[in-house]
Image (cartoon, rainbow, N blue to C red):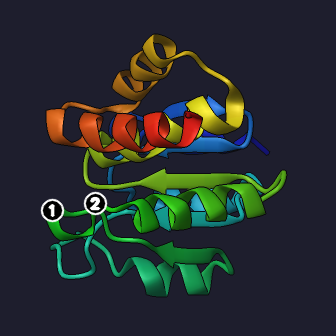
Amino acid sequence: MSDAFQALARVPNACRLLPNIVTGGQPSTADLEAFREAGGGIVLDLRDPMEPRPIDEPATAARLDLDYVVIPVAVGTMTDATLERIHGVLRDAGDRPVFVHCGSGSRVGGALLPFLMLEHGLEEEDAIGQAMRVGLRSADLLEWGLGYARRRSG
């Protein structure tokens, strides 16, 4: 049995952000099957449910007995409440492997940037570097995550 990151290595922008958090773009059915086989527990989808996708991800996750959580990140949902929900799922996961994804990894990077700073003590520059490694490419998403972290860090 492989680990969660190895199971998801074919996903676009696959990245092991933390020991139990793997990030990336849109997975295939085979990717989710491999994630489950490797002990994966939670799929956190940051895509809007109305976005086109190649698989029926909720049904696939249910069939595989994966917890499937959708917290859409889009222009109208880039709020503190959205970040708090995302970070809550990650905190509550404990040691269970979590796969956090959007279409490409950019929204994932913006959403996890403040998590790295506030929950894991990374300095701003290091957190930005990690968010970019995950796939962050949007200035708006960067400002969203940084703004939240700056307001919370006092």
Q: Horizontal placement of 20 versus 67: left or right? A: right
* Quarter-of-image position of residue 75: bottom left
Q: Secondary structure at mark 1?
A: helix
Q: Secondary structure at mark 2?
A: loop
Q: Position of residue 5 (x, y in %)?
A: 62, 37
Which residue does the numbered mark 2 point to in the structure image? Answer: 78
Task: Determine the residue positioned at 54% across, 43% down.
Answer: 152
Task: Determine the residue positioned at 84% across, 51% down.
Answer: 95
Which residue does the numbered mark 1 point to in the structure image? Answer: 75
Amino acid tagged 1: Val
| Disc 2 to disc 1, C-alpha distance | 6 Å
* Quarter-of-image position of residue 18: top right
Task: Determine the residue positioned at 59% across, 86% down.
Answer: 63
From what the image shows, is residue 128 above or below residue 102? above
Q: Is residue 145 visible?
A: yes
Q: Position of residue 12 (x, y in %)?
A: 33, 39
Count residues near mark 2 (Cα–Cα under 10 Å), then give few for <14, some for 14-19, many for 20+.
Answer: some
Question: Which residue is the extreme one toward the front?
Answer: 154
The answer to whether marks 2 and 1 mark residues whose Cβ atoms lie closer than 8 Å is yes
Task: Determine the residue positioned at 52% across, 75% down.
Answer: 69
Amino acid tagged 2: Met
Q: Is residue 6 visible?
A: no
